[in-house]
Image: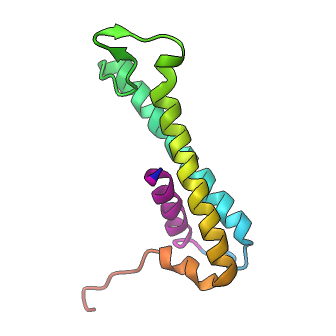
Amino acid sequence: MISGALLFGLAWAILGCFKFKEELPAGILCLYGVAFAVFCGVLWECYEFTCDSLFAMNLQRYLSAGRALAGRAALLDTMGDLIAGLAGSLLFSCWSYWRLKNDRSWLKTFFFKKYSPDD
């Protein structure tokens, strides 16, 4: 669940790198954060599947004691990861929505800050 919240925050940090309309509704910003977090989770599962297929790494936990699992047992790791990422991003989204409604400038706390060696 932590990864979903962290990826949600990363989505907003990346958003700060671009010029965007700061008056975007809080709901749209939260939807963007959840979508980004879920998309990253799907990409991660694709990475695990590729490593399992090409290098027999068992990242998706489809092997147990050397025997291949089938059906629901084979899906538990993947679905658990996807559901945890979604749950974390949704929880953080609810909290973020409330914070944005009360203090719009809170969004800027996620933005990357430019570093200058002279500082």
Q: Which residues are magenta?
A: 2-18
Residue lying at the far bottom in this picture: please name it: 119
Residue lying at the far left in this picture: please name it: 117
Residue 105, percent across and down?
Answer: 59, 85
Q: Is residue 12 magenta?
A: yes
Of 115 and 41, which appears nearest the observer? 41
Of 54 and 10, which appears nearest the observer? 10
Q: Does the rendering let one see residue 42?
A: no
- Image point 48% across, 18% down: which residue? 73
Q: Does the rendering let one see residue 49?
A: yes
Residue 72, percent across and down?
Answer: 54, 17
Q: Is residue 117 magenta?
A: no
Q: Is the residue 70 above or below the residue 4 in the image?
A: above
Residue 88, percent across and down?
Answer: 53, 53
User: Quarter of the image containing the C terminus?
Assistant: bottom left
Q: Is the residue 64 above or below the residue 22 in the image?
A: above
Q: Is the residue 117 above or below the residue 80 in the image?
A: below
- Image point 65% across, 77% down: which residue? 100
